[in-house]
Amino acid sequence: ARWPAPCRNGCRDRSRREDPEVARGSRPEDLQILIALLEHQVLGRLAVDLSLLADEVIAMTRPLWEQRARGGRVELVRDLESSVWTMGVAGEVREALLNLVHNALDAMENGGTLAVRCYGSGDRALLEVEDDGIGMEAEVLERAFDPFFTTKGTRGSGLGLAEVHGVMRRHHGQAELRSRPGSGTLVRLSFPR
């Protein structure tokens, strides 16, 4: 791109006129460059390795597992395919995954099995968090992503799954929830690759 030279002598020098196309910013490639810069620099959208994020969340939460599961033993099933990428905001995806792990730990009242999976399937990058905790009734499942809906009483704000849903919407993905009372819960996050 050609940028106009700085104007000296109060802009009286007519020989230094700028290219009208550059001045108006009407070239399509300039607009695409600006959009790309905004997405990457302002919104922070970059390539995100979901497997690496999952490992980070496991490491961050592990010291809390027994406390969150009320003293019970938590066994981890870690199934992370390497280098599963999406475009996104790593901090938002990490926060969503943290919410899911904390919910899983809360659901396993006396410990249990926590599974964290990451894999690619076609044009999708998938993250799953599954527990073998108390599960959810159909009525609870229907409202699980509603803001301020909680079954945890004063221990919960009702914002965790609502935030997960918002993160997925901003990343052009989907959050799927499967659960049955007494059989645990599976949350699958599906991102575009």
Image (cartoon, grey):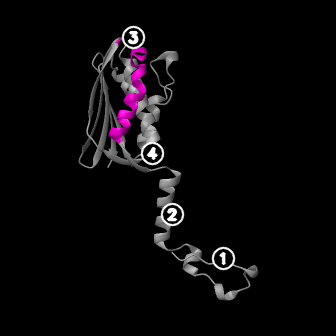
Q: Label 2 sits on what residue type?
A: Leu
Tag 1 or tag 2, which sits nearer the N-term?
1
| Amino acid beneath label 3 | Gly
Q: Amino acid at mark 4?
A: Val
Q: Are marks 1 and 4 in contact (CB under 8 Å)?
A: no
Name the residue that disc number 2 marks: 34
| Disc 2 residue crowd, few under 14, some 14–19, many 20+, Cα 10 Å | few
Do residues under tags 3 and 4 come within 8 Å of each other at their CB atoms?
no
Residue extending furthest toward the right: 10
Residue 55 in sight in this render: yes
Give the labeled residue for mark 4.
89
Quadrant in the rendering for residue 10: bottom right
Q: CA distance from mark 1 to mark 4?
A: 37 Å
| Residue 54: image tag | none
Density class for disc 1 (Cα within 10 Å; few <14, some 14-19, many ≥20) is few
Query: Residue 31: horizontal and vertical position, in percent?
Result: 50, 67
Query: What distance separates the C-alpha of mark 4 from that of mark 2?
Result: 18 Å
Q: Amino acid at mark 1?
A: Pro
Observer-nearest of 110 and 166: 110
Give how far apart the Cα atoms at labels 3 and 2 are.
Answer: 52 Å
Mark 1 = which residue? 6
Magenta-drawn stretch contains 20: no
Mark 3 to mark 4 CA distance (whole Å): 34 Å
The CA distance from mark 1 to mark 3 is 68 Å
Vertical comparison of 139 with 25: above or below: above
